[in-house]
Image (cartoon, rainbow, N blue to C red):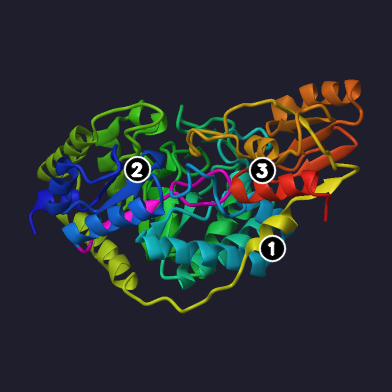
């Protein structure tokens, strides 16, 4: 196999549009490793199913991937909100069987559509409540909790024949910098990293996870390079944790890589460090760029690195063999399992005090979810306003999710003691006597919260 085709086989790209553009079809024919969907690629399930089929028809080995975590992060249901609770909600419920059933139901849905790899679960331990990018995407703040639910999520997804991808190795939960925007550094010592951050990844590997995604985060105790580019940390994943599957980079268009070493050099260093698939990223959000041109840059830089002796053909062949092993695994027929998970969303939404309101005055404090979730409609506000029995005029219902909104919430409940606060962020001490906790966003928990508030409780 020629080097250019091997280089194409290392690349996963996003694209703009709801049908396969000609340039992408040419790249798939040239050996492109995979395609990652984003919200701009999906209008509904029928269209998504046709899109997946058209990609697989171009070449049977091409991988179709999607960020499907539940809660705020979904591509397949970006327009309507996820049908599945967030990781934080499942961690708060702490019913491992429920987590497995939610992931199994999600996996069956993705398999029916034609998605090969779900870029989940998030097994970062959300150790810092000020973390701007993980938050309710994590199962929680302790390694044991994250490990057992991450393993259950892996088992559920993969029981449906969809490959799981544990992310973001070796952990993005203790940073205060979003790697979409800049390069974070974690300064904790090795013993803390081993006990806190690596434990859930070890559990995911033991559960048989097929893929692991890297973090663009520097772990100074191990290496000065971010994990994505670190032979030390990727070697630890292989040699100490025993992972033999496919290593996928987080998106190379994130500023932690693109604004430091650059896309092409980042791709070469990641591949040399031990990555198998290089994710280019989302060319439609939050910034736009020419994805075909970006792939060309990455492929050309990888080919040049081989010619210069900085990257071996054997390393590319090793990556190709691992990807081939993943595609062979995907041909298995998943077992039939039609477990109903509707009760899980209802169980994860909890409350204290009197939260029943007939005609709420909804005050949404707003604030973006995060770049990883993409641009999101306010499903909870829509659910409340759509179900209310009459014009607004009743008690104040405050919607909030960010730690920096707590002071504002406290001021509101001081002026309106009977107000209901609906908190969709991580577990914190939320002010007010009447509080609803959803532990994340998405349609499933929004509807459960609206039913609790407007439907008379449970």
> Circles 1 and 2: CB distance less than 8 Å?
no
Pointer 3 or 2: first along the chain: 2
Badge 3: how crowded within 10 Å, few (<14), some, or many (20+)? many
Of 116 and 341, nearer the camera is 341
* Alpha carbon separation for disc pair 3 and 2: 33 Å
Local crowd at mark 2 within 10 Å, few (<14), some, or many (≥20)?
many
351 relative to 17, above or below? below
The one of 53 and 409 positioned closer to us in this rendering: 53
Q: Main secondary structure of the magenta part?
A: loop
* Residues at circles 1 and 3 in contact by the CB criterion of under 8 Å: no
67 inside magenta stretch: yes
Q: Which residues are magenta?
A: 60-75
Residue 330: x %, y % from top left: 34, 69
Q: Which residue is mark 3?
A: 127
Q: Residue at x 16, y 54 (%)?
A: 31
Outermost residue, front side: 390
Work out whether 295 lies above or below 156: above
The picture places residue 110, in percent across and down from the top left corner, at 43, 60
Residue under label 1? 343
Name the residue carrying label 2: 41
What separation in Å lies between label 1 and label 3 (alpha carbons)? 29 Å
Q: Secondary structure at mark 2?
A: helix
């Amino acid at each position: 196999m020629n080097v250019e085709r091997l280089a194409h086989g290392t690349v996963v790209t996003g694209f703009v549009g709801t049908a396969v553009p000609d340039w992408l079809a040419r790249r798939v024919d040239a050996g492109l490793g995979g395609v990652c969907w984003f919200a701009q690629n999906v209008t509904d399930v029928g269209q998504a199913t046709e899109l997946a089929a058209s990609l697989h028809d171009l070449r049977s080995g091409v991988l179709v991937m999607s960020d499907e975590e539940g809660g705020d992060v979904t591509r397949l249901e970006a327009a309507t909100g996820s049908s599945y609770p967030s990781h934080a909600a499942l961690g708060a419920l702490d019913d491992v069987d429920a987590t497995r059933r939610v992931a199994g139901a999600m996996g069956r849905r993705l398999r029916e559509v034609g998605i090969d790899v779900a870029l989940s679960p998030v097994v970062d331990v959300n150790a810092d409540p000020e973390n701007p990018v993980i938050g309710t995407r994590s199962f929680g703040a302790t390694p044991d909790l994250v490990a057992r639910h991450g393993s259950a999520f892996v088992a559920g997804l993969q029981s449906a024949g969809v490959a799981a991808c544990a992310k973001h190795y070796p952990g993005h939960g203790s940073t205060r910098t979003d790697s979409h925007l800049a390069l974070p550094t974690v300064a904790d010592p090795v013993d803390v990293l081993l006990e806190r951050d690596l434990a859930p990844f070890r559990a995911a590997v033991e559960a048989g996870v097929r893929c692991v995604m890297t973090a663009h985060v520097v772990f100074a105790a191990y290496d000065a390079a971010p994990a994505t580019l670190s032979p030390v940390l990727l070697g630890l994943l292989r040699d100490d944790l025993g992972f033999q599957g496919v290593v996928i980079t987080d998106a190379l268009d994130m500023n932690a890589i693109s604004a430091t070493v650059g896309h092409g050099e980042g791709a070469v260093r990641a591949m040399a460090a031990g990555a198998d698939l290089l994710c280019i990223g989302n060319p439609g959000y939050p910034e736009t760029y020419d994805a075909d041109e970006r792939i060309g840059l990455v492929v050309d830089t990888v080919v040049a690195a081989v010619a210069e002796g900085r990257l071996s053909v054997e390393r590319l062949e090793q990556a190709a063999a691992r990807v081939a092993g993943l595609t062979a695994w995907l041909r298995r027929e998943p077992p039939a399992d039609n477990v109903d998970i509707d009760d899980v969303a209802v169980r994860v939404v909890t409350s204290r005090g009197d939260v029943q309101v007939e005609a709420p005055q909804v005050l949404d404090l707003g604030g973006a979810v995060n770049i990883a979730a993409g641009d999101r409609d306010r499903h909870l506000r829509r659910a409340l306003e759509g179900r209310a029995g009459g014009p607004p005029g009743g008690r104040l219902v405050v919607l909030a999710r960010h730690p920096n909104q707590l002071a504002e919430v406290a001021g509101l409940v001081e002026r309106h003691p009977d107000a209901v606060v609906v908190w969709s962020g991580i577990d914190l001490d939320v002010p007010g006597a009447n509080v609803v906790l959803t532990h994340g966003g998405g349609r499933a928990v929004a509807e459960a919260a609206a039913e609790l508030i407007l439907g008379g409780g449970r």
